[in-house]
Structures are given as structure tokens and as C-alpha cells.
Amino acid sequence: MVKQFDAFWKAFAISAAVFMTGIYVGVLLDSGRVDEVRAEYTGMDIQTSDARLQSLYYQTFKNTSNFCGPAINENLAFSDKVYREGLKIDQYEKVNKFAPALIGEKRRYVLLKLQFWLNAIELKKTCNASYVNVVYLYSHYNATVQEQVQSTVLMDLKNQYGPEMMLIPLPLDLNITTIEIIKKQYGIKTSPTILIDEKIKLEGLQTKDFLNEKILEAKNS
Amino acid sequence: MDYTDEIFLVFAYITLYFTVLFMLLHFRNRKEMFSAPKGNCCPPVSIIIPAYNEEDNIAATIRKVKAFDYPPGSLEIIVIDDGSKDRTQEFAKREGVRVITKENGGKAAALNYGTTLAGGNIVGVVDADSYPEPDALKAMIPYFEEPGVGAVTSSVQVKDAKNYLERLQEMEYLLIAWGRKLLDYVGSVYVTPGPLSLYRKDALEKIGGFDEKILTEDIEVAWRLHRAKYTVKMALGARVYTKAPKTWKKWWNQRLRWDIGGLQTIGKHKETLFRRGYGIFGLFIVPFFSVSIVLSMIGLGLFVYLFTTRAADYAAFSYYAWKAGINPLEYYSISFIPNVFTVLGILGFGLSWIYLIIGLRTMGKKITPQTIVDMFMYLVPYLFLFPILLVHSFWRIAAYRKQKW
């Protein structure tokens, strides 16, 4: 019987084709996620610019009677959306294997969050709003389990307080100048760190009860 | 991608390659897999039955060998009683065959002794707990018409599979027999199992018989035949039924012996790995055998690594969650987002099922709902035991423990 040695290279060619198809489908999935994140970003970028213009418009004309309610609601909806997108990027970063790193998108989202935070401070002053700003500073590159738990605790509190709490998570190590300024201003040297209403600084893992107490304190002050 | 991702990709590709190779060989040859070459009947054959403490089986085995559809004048049966402490010798003698008793020295030594006594040009080996079909010998002999054939082996199947472990082994043996036939098409049959194999006597003498120091003399002898440029053939239509271990403990010990013997054999022939001078033996048989072991270990390593890191993550999360005053069970998130590994994983698992179904159907097994359940049990928990066995084997070898035959 003739030995069928050609089967070795034929199997190599077929398995390489099947394998590359699998890789290609994987790349498509990765790219689809990157495109999704980029498209969401474009939408939100427009929304942020619109919100900034609204603030500027009402500050210029000093007419806050019709402005505050819709602006606060819009800011809140925007906050939730940016937060959800941030979580989505984190998840996609973990599963994507072939697409380019999402670090660029991540930095853009951080800039949006910074703008949102400043907007939230401004709205609070202009409209005398009662919500509490909670800024959560964490490490992107060296994320710890404590940060994972802290993030979960803050999410839980956010669900509990709804529109009464603005949660703004910001990574400390993405080389963003504004965040470097914030770090210097508040003397932040460790993560996780939480800023409540730009006044209270809490370093290290905080319990849910303690944070709840501090948020209530800030809300009633 | 980190290094575990890269290891996974290499692992996935090699596994895929072998699966595709086997499928390709199957689809090319599926119509003539069970047919044997035409040849003259019937050269003198000496069947050696090595036996150690086999009083429960020896008589039935001899009767089955005597029942071979083969001219009695051309069939010699020699039982080598390897110093049994029970009534093996007495029961064998009652069957009217030649029984030689020697001091206990192990199976390979018994076979070597039997070969020196054999009068036939073809020497057959039948384990004392194995029962060949009457037409098996006639299905194997014609392969020796080709001068370069040094040995011919058969389709070993499980006798009377009753409990679940035996049923899993029944499935495994069918797949092994089918796979061995596929390897035959690339001249790579790497074992001549003890339940029923035939050897050209002068080939056996030329290579120096069975190695008495190796636990799996049936693998090692086939490797030396390949090195001596003989080919080893697989007669899929020649069936022999053997008793498979009924308990997990016995199964574990048997497989430990196979693994240690396999590792000993690799160690003995390691210099042939990827050497062109040894032909298919150095370029495929030894690498295939070695890669199977490496892949098995990598698979286990990856599983253990991923499992322990996830478990450690969860333990740490639970500890800090408890410290932060939240219930970890409520918050630990396991998200599923498909990526390239999901695609390759599904592809690999799907191909494994197709491979199993094709193999079992080729071997005449009906695919029932129970077979599907058995296949799942075979693919997931049963096959998972093999890398663990390998670890145990490595440990045994490292600790120089002697494995009993």
C-alpha cells in the first residue's frame, strides 16, 4: 500500500486555513467592539460639547429658571452613560486579543468624565443642586482587588442614591495633565482614593457603611 | 496577549492539526478500512500466550486461540507460565497445548523465551485474558506478503463492558483502534498491543526480541521494528476482546504502567526525535507520541493555572468585600464576552464531537442518547484524568518506584 505522506502537508494547509478563519472571526469580534466604543464616544463627545455650550449660554444670559432642571437631568443621564461606557471599555480590554489597545479610547472617556465633573460642580453652584459629587480615583495599570471591591461598593451606593449622587471614576495613571493637577491639588499618593464634594478625601478601601455616612453628611451640609 | 494566550494558541493549533490529519486520512480511506490484502494461506504460526496467575482466564483464551479459522497443522500454541502461584499451569495443560513453566521474569522475558521455542515463521502474541475472534488470524496473515512488514496488530476491544468505567473504556478502545488504522496509512502504527499481535520471527530475532526493562514492551518493540526499517500494519477487521479493568484503582494502575512504559520508551529512543535518517519514525512517530504528552501536560498546566488564579482572585475579592461590608456572592461578576478563544474553543470542542461520532460510527457503534452522554463523560472528565496520570507517572519515575506488571 502506498503511504499517504501528502496527508501531512495537506492537513497542515487545511488546519492552518481553519485556524486562521478562527483567528479572523476573533479579530472581527475585537474590531467590532472597538468600533462600537468609538461610535459611542463620537455620540458622547457631541453631547458633552452641547452640555458645555448650554452652561455657557445660561451663564451668559443669567437665566437659570428654565435651565437647571433639564441641565441636571441631562448631566445625570450623561454621567450614567459615561460610567457604563467606561465599564464596557474595561471589559472589552480584558477580552480583546488582537485589536489595538483601547487605551486611546479610555483616555478620551476620562477627558469626558473630567468635563462632566467640572460641569457637575458648576451646575451645583449655579442651580444650588442637592446631589453629592463622588470622585473615585483608581489605578488603571496596576488595578488591585481592593479597587475592584471599592468600585463595587460605589456602584451599589450609586444605585441606592440614584440622581442624588454623581459618581465620577478617574484613573490616576493614564498620563492626563488635568488628573496630575488634581493629584497635586489634593495630595493623592495612593489608590483607591475617594473625594466627596471636593472636600472630603478618603484613602484606601472604605466600607459601605462609612461611605454612606459620609455621603449623607455631605448631602445634609 | 499574554504568554498564557500564546500557549493556548499553540496548543489549539497543534490539536487542530492532528484532528484534521486524522479526519483527512479517514475520509480518504473509509471504504476500505476493514478490508485485508489478498494473500496465500497459511504459513506456520506460533501463538505465544504469556500467563502469570491467570487461572480464571487461561482456559477460555486457549480455547479461543484453538478456534482460529486456520489449519491446525500450521498453528502452534505455546503457553509460557511465568512462574504463576495459582493453577494456571494445570488449567492450561488440560486444554492440550504446550505449556512451559519458567521462573517469574515478567511478560517481555516470557515472550522472548516463547519466541526461542516457536517453530512458525510468524510469531503471535495473545494475552492470557484476551479472546480473539475466529477469523482474526486470517485477516492479519496476508499483510506479511509484503516483505518489509515486521508486525501486524489487531483491533483490541473491551470484553463484556458492564459497569460505567468499562463502557468508557469500550468507547476509548474503539477510538484507539480506529485511530491506529488511520496512522497505518502514514506508516505510523506505533504499538503492537499484547491482546493480539503477530510478528515476523526473523524480524523479532534481528532486533533482539522484546526489551525486558521497559514496562510497555509492546510499544518499544514496535519502535525498534520501525528503526530497523520494518513496517507495522494494523488489521482493523481482526478483532480481539480483552478484559478491561473494572475498578478505578485497577484502571489507574494499568494506565500508570502504560504511561511510565511510554516515557521509558521515549527516553530510550530520544535521539531519533526529528532525525530525518530515521524516516517516518523520527519525523512523525516519536514526535507525535512526545507531543501528545507535552500537549497533555500543557493542557493540564493551563487549566490549573487559570483555575487557581481565578480561585485566588475570588478568595481575595471575598475577603475585601467582607471587610468593606458587602456580600461577595451578590457582587462577584462573571461576564461572558466572546473573543478569539471562545471561537477556537467552540471550534475545537465541535471538532472533538465530530471526531468521536465519526470514529464510533466507523467502528460500528450506534449513536444513541446514552452514547451522547457517554461521549460527554469521555471527553470531559475521563480524558481529563490522563494528564493527571502523566504527572503521577513523572513523579513515579522521579522517585524511582518500581511499577508492577
Image: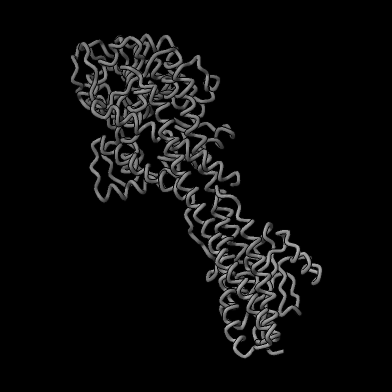
Instruction: Please state, as top left, top right, bottom left or bottom right, where the N terminus of chain A lies in the image.
Output: top left
Q: Is residue B244 above or below residue B80?
A: below
**Left or right: B350, with A194 as reference point:** left
Q: Residue at x 66, y 83 (%)?
A: A58
Q: Residue furthest front?
A: A61
Question: Which residue is at the front of the view, B63 or A34?
Answer: A34
Q: Is any part of residue B243 visible from this angle?
A: yes
Residue B102 percent across, percent down from the top left:
39, 18
Name the image colouring: one colour
Q: Is residue A203 above or below residue B177?
A: below
Residue B70 percent across, percent down from the top left:
19, 17
Query: Looking at the rendering, which quadrant does residue A211 occupy?
Result: bottom right
Q: Residue at x 67, y 60 (%)?
A: A140
Residue A75 percent across, percent down from the top left:
60, 78
Query: Looking at the rendering, which quadrant does residue B139 occupy?
Result: top left
Q: Is residue B357 above or below residue A106?
A: above
Instruction: Please state, as top left, top right, bottom left or bottom right, where the C terminus of chain A lies in the image.
Output: bottom right
Residue B188 percent across, percent down from the top left:
40, 23
Q: Is any part of residue B98 visible from this angle?
A: no
Q: Residue at x 22, y 25 (%)?
A: B63
Question: Which residue is at the front of the view, B189 or B131?
Answer: B189
Question: Which residue is at the front of the view, A152 or A59?
Answer: A59
**Left or right: A175, with A100 as reference point:** right
Q: What is the count of numbered marks?
A: 0
Query: Looking at the rendering, which quadrant does residue A143 occupy?
Result: bottom right
